[in-house]
Image (cartoon, grey):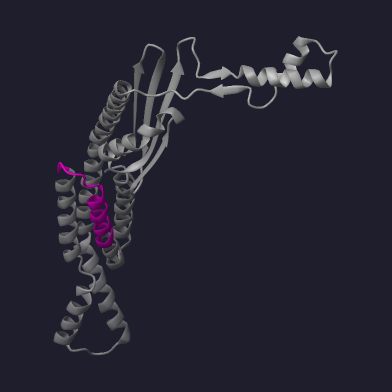
Amino acid sequence: MTGFGKSFLQLPNKKITVEIKSLNSKGLDLNARTPSVYRELELRLRNQISQALERGKIDFSLYVEVSSEETSSKINVPVVKAYMKQLKEIHSNCEEVELLKIAIRMPDILKTEREEINEEEQIQIIQVVTEALQNLISFRKNEGASLQTELELRISNIEKLMNAAVAYDEERINTIKTRLKTALDELQTTVDTNRFEQELIYYLEKYDITEEKVRLTNHLKYFLETINEADSNGKKLGFITQEMGREINTMGSKSNHSEMQKVVVMMKDELEKIKEQVLNIL
């Protein structure tokens, strides 16, 4: 969801600059900074931005740079004269220049004339905001293309690591069998062979990771399918990564094998990188 868009509007007497910045957020958090003269447009601009960007922490700024000699602030001449008159009554020998220097420091010396925004300028501002939004969305798409490549690589890494973990399965099972048989031999007691095999099968089933492998494979496939959908799917991808994490954690708890546990840790590392990147998807 990160992005940045900027656009300009040059009018005869001023230059308007629009900047829009977007950061990651679970919902839409829009902060707008506009000059007071454009406040009547703010609600309309907020709706425009909300519909275009959907999610993210959005900072919208509209700057105005006056390029003509005219200003909206004027010196309030009657107030200045009134101050000077009062000051002269207090100090009749004071020169006019000195009285003026004191008077211009007094309150209400400047008056601001409210500038009215006509319909044509409003339309132009909406157009320049649209252009800034398009630039931001284009930025997002470029980031998204790079992000998709990164996520596909991480998914591929998890799949390879999962297969590497499964490759240790036969060695792990044989190790468990040997350990149990050695323990029984040390007890120097006779056991029923059939009963021993039944108990061994039951014991090994608790360490079987076949179901976890199947479910994790399905989650990896579903993740890749979802990332290629046209619709907004960031939240869905987040849910899928949670399910992937459950299967990886279960594989880790069942591994009972040092090398397999190392592979599981590497899978968790890849998954954490995916979770960080998924936050940046709408």
Which quadrant of the figure contains the N terminus?
Answer: top left
Q: Where 127 sits versus 141, above or below?
A: above
Residue 35 appears in the picture as rendered: no
Left or right: where 94 falls relative to 39: right
Residue 271 appears in the picture as rendered: yes
In the foreground, 208 or 12: 12
The residue under the point 17% across, 47% down is 226
Total marks shown come to 0
Which quadrant of the figure contains the C terminus?
Answer: top left
In the foreground, 172 or 118: 118
In the foreground, 95 or 141: 95
In the foreground, 8 or 274: 8
x and y, in percent, of residue 35 in the image: 45, 29
x and y, in percent, of residue 95 in the image: 80, 10
Which residues, given as a range, are shown in magenta?
Answer: 228-247
The residue under the point 23% across, 50% down is 237
Q: Quadrant of residue 135?
A: top left
Instruction: Label the magenta part by its dominant secondary structure.
Output: helix
The residue under the point 23% across, 74% down is 206
Q: Where 120 sits versus 24, above or below?
A: above
Left or right: where 90 falls relative to 165: right
Q: Quadrant of residue 263?
A: bottom left
Q: Quadrant of residue 92?
A: top right
Is 242 part of what is drawn in magenta? yes
x and y, in percent, of residue 109 in the image: 63, 22
Is 152 part of what is drawn in magenta? no
The residue under the point 33% across, 61% down is 258
x and y, in percent, of residue 2 in the image: 34, 36
Left or right: where 64 falls relative to 27: right
Q: Where 231 sits versus 165, above or below?
A: above
